[in-house]
Amino acid sequence: MKRIFLIHGDKGGVGKTEAAKRIAAVMMQAKHPITLIDGDNKNPGLHAAFKAGDGDVRCINVMKPAGLDALFGAIAGSPGDVLIDLPARGSDVTARLTSEGASEDGFDLSLLIEEIGAEIYIIFVIDQTRAPVVALKDELAALPSAKWIIVKNHREDREFDLFDKSKIKADLEGRGAPVIDMIRLDPRVNDVLENKSLNMLSALESDDLSMLQKIRIKAALRSWSEQMRKAGLLE
């Protein structure tokens, strides 16, 4: 069954695109067919990282009615899974995707899923701050029928107290939603990936990184593969 992954987190800078890049890299490494859609018109980091490769990656402004039409077509026409990296204020997009769907500024995602026989996953990225946890509570209420996966972004060395002690975590546990960890990658490696428009797979073939930096990328890929298996995203 086709799966639609919405990479969410609502606020900018929480690590949505990093999670999207890692999912895409692991899927491609496993030779799993996936269509990549970068919905961030202002900062299309997913598109920049994968546009030079063999994968199917598209840049679609999902904040515009024409972009939602293009998104509909991309989801319906994809031969495999679809990964959508939502922009900041992703809740504005999900509100349009869960509208009644008759107007030109949205469509009913549940009807599309029923039509093509797909499953929808919300992969929600949080850090240790309050804003994404509050947004998560609102989106859980707005999208109760989706399959939820929470990603803890460990870029900072501190606990996730706001999330771990919240009622939201208990709600997620009741739904059987997995919580997985995205480990920190050496910031100097991230800088090279960003500046050279590389992803974790293309970086392993690049002369712009040292052997040690490539080993750190391999470690991050291995860890993320294990987390994706834990979440049921990878066999």
Image (tube, grey):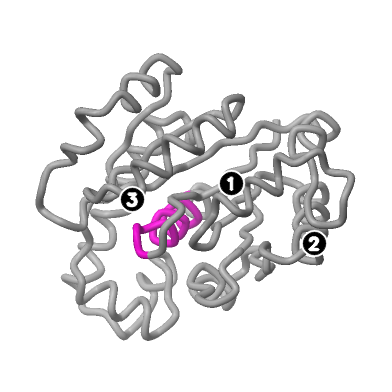
Residue 235 appears in the picture as rendered: no
Residue denoted by label 3: 131
Q: Which residues are magenta?
A: 13-26
Name the residue at 42% across, 18% down. Answer: 176
**Toward the viewer: 41 or 51?**
41
Check disc 1 and report the residue beneath it.
32
User: Looking at the image, is 195 positioned above or below residue 204?
Assistant: below
What residue is shown with label 2? Answer: 70
> In the rendered view, would you say 63 is above or below 95?
below
For the N terminus, the image quarter is: top right
Q: Amino acid at mark 2?
A: Ala
In the rendered image, residue 83 lying in the magenta stretch gets the answer: no
Disc 3 versus disc 2: nearer the observer: 3
Task: Say which residue appears at 33% left-offset and 50% top-offset.
Answer: 131
Between disc 1 and disc 3, whose residue precedes?
1
Total marks placed: 3
Mark 2, residues whose alpha carbon is within 10 Å: few (<14), some, or many (≥20)?
A: some
Asked whether 93 or 196 is in front, the reply is 93
Residue 227: quadrant of the picture: top left
**Residue 113: percent from the left, percent from the top?**
76, 34
CB atoms at circles 1 and 2 under 8 Å apart?
Answer: no
Report if residue 14 lies within the magenta region.
yes
- Between marks 1 and 2 in the image, the one whose residue lies nearer the viewer: 2
One can see residue 153 in this view:
yes
Q: Secondary structure at mark 2?
A: helix
